Amino acid sequence: MQDFIFYFKIGWSHIISSSATDHLYFIAALTIIYQLSDWKKVLVLVTAFTIGHAITLYFSALDILRFSVEWVEFIIPCTIMITAAKNLVMTEETVVGNRIQYAMALCFGLVHGMGYANYIRMMLSSDQKLVWSLFSFNMGLEIGQIFVVLVVLLISWMLHRYKIISQRLWIMLFSLVILGLSLFMAYQRIPFFNK
């Protein structure tokens, strides 16, 4: 049980910390197009992201996959930009019937997992309970993501409920802010600029 708590806390802090802004931006951008009544869809979406994340971490911990840290750190904000930009062009009808969201969440989960792969490889290299440790980590990550999702959905619900701002305008403004922040993050991480 101590191992579970240890890795659960690491997974939780992987998203709920000041150093996890790229992860927070992505989950927020993924969630903002939904309403509180869509919570089941959002839960499936976030779980798809966690599954992608877990797959990359698993193969990395086994030292089957290795990634260029510089390029991964650049690609991660690019996934956020794509997600935020997609929000700007989606209509209410395309949100409801859009199954591409799930494939994107899974694929981008693979990419985001790469960003944590080297760290997790070193941490788990001597751990005999690899599957249990990764499960514990991903449970912490999933619960952290669900917390972020609930915060975003509740803010959206309150803004809509009290007619502070229309749902569409809120999605546009929020996505534009995330797009700008991720663009700046990507600019800072361009690999050949950093050498």
Image (tube, rainbow, N blue to C red):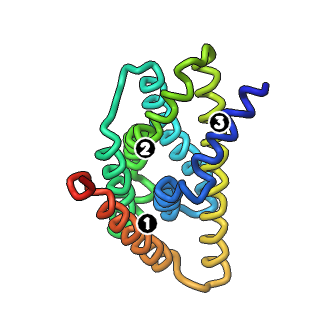
Instruction: Give me the residue at 43% from left, 44% from top.
Output: 112
Judged from the image, the secondary structure of the residue bearing numbered disc 2 is helix
Give amino acid for label 1: Glu
Residue drawn at x 58%, y 59% as measured from the top left: 18
The type of residue carrying mark 3 is Met
Q: Decide: few, some or many residues near mark 2? Use Cα within 10 Å; few <14, some 14-19, many ≥20.
A: many
Relative to 173, does residue 77 appear above or below in the rendering? Answer: above
The residue that appears at 60% across and 35% down in the rendered structure is 138
Q: Quick one: label 2 or label 3, which is nearer the N terminus?
A: 2
In three-dimensional space, the C-alpha distance between marks 2 and 3, rounded to whole angstroms, equals 16 Å
- Secondary structure under tag 1 reads helix
Contact, CB < 8 Å: mark 1 with mark 3? no
**Label whose residue precedes the other's in the sequence (1 or 3):** 1
Residue 105 in view: yes
In the foreground, 175 or 69 = 69
Determine the residue positioned at 35% across, 42% down: 69
Provide the residue designation for mark 3: 139
* Residue ID for mark 2: 112
**Side of 180 where 30 appears, left or right:** right
**CA distance separating discs 1 and 3:** 31 Å
State the residue in front, 24 or 193: 193
Residue 90 visible in the snapshot: no
